[in-house]
Image (tube, grey):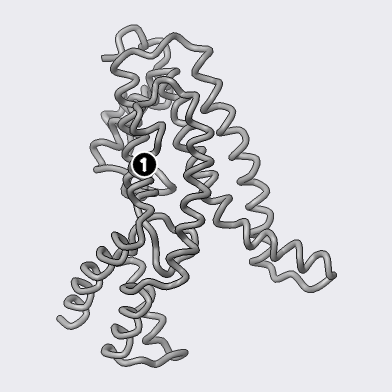
Amino acid sequence: MLKGQKTFYSEYLKELEAKDNFPPAFSTGFMGEGLAPRALLQFFSYNWGRSPFLASHYYTLRFMANLGLKHTEHSNCKYFRKLQKHGEFIPTPTAIVYYHFLDEAFHTTTSRFMARELYRDFSQPTAYEKFVANLAFYKLQERIWNGLSAVVPDRHRPDDYSVMSFLYKILQSDTFGMSTKDALFWMKQCLCQEHQGFHQNLQFHQSLLQEFRRTFNSLEYLWFVNREMKPMVSGGNIERAIKGNIKTLQQFSQLVAA
């Protein structure tokens, strides 16, 4: 499917194949957080390692992750600068987040440039390369940007078991000391009815969506559904998020009671 691309094949992947070790699947970072089944992640690794076009397209995905993280850390950056301006004590975690924000700003800029310009220096992508690029782009939206959290600021995916388990542990900790019944009651209040947290996250969602569209609008090889960020658009729905949380919390409650 990538005929003529053998000369571009990653030396690292060649070494793995020589050891009968198929290209690895991501286990950490934005690509490893459930983007796709393991076999599909290996498929992406193999293709990104063989095609200059697909290797450069990877930076569209990296840009989405960079900008999302930068967006999340922006409020902490503002807090750092406020403390700094008034000569107040700056906690170490706040300082770490601030300098990571600066690092992420650099990565966001470089990823944006490489996503929009680098692929133009290579041969026109084949139909197969376009398909792989669009599949990865769509899958990342579907996994990372396809929802709203009720309780985690700037989280653009549904509240799953990991979020609910975290809330449950906090409410049952020594700080709150809630019973199972009380903890589940307050989780329902937080997760399953409309409140300001949803609207704040929807504002974050719309801000990111506009930035993504501006960045990717010039990428002619993207499918229309990807240029318009349709999976992400569908995730910006409070009513849908609440319905999903009601269902997930019911399942979580059954597990806790078992």
The residue located at (80%, 73%) in the rendering is 88
Which residue appears at 55% of the width and 56% of the height?
72
Q: Residues within 10 Å of mark 1 (few under 14, many from 20)?
A: many
Q: Which residue is mark 1?
A: 140
Q: Position of residue 119 (x, y in %)?
A: 49, 18
111 on left or right of 246: right
Instruction: Identify whether 139 is placed above or below 188.
Output: above
In the image, residue 8 above or below residue 187: above
Number of numbered discs on residues: 1
Residue 69 screen position, x and y as percent = 53, 51
**Residue at the top extreme, as displayed:** 4
Asked where in the image residue 95 lies, by quadrant, the reply is bottom right
Residue 232 falls in image quadrant: top left
Q: State the residue at coordinates (21%, 68%).
A: 247
Res 165 seen here: no
Kindly give the residue lying farthest to the left in the view shown: 258
Query: Is there any visible trace of residue 236 in the rendered image?
Result: yes
Camera-nearest residue between 87 and 194: 194
Question: Nearest the camera: 131 or 242?
Answer: 242
Residue 138, position as x, y percentages in the image: 33, 37
The amino acid sitting under disc 1 is: Leu
Q: Residue at the location (42% across, 26% down)?
A: 12
Q: Position of residue 109 (x, y in %)?
A: 62, 36
- Asked if residue 255 is positioned above or below residue 161 in the image, the reply reads below
Q: Is residue 218 left or right of residue 149?
A: right
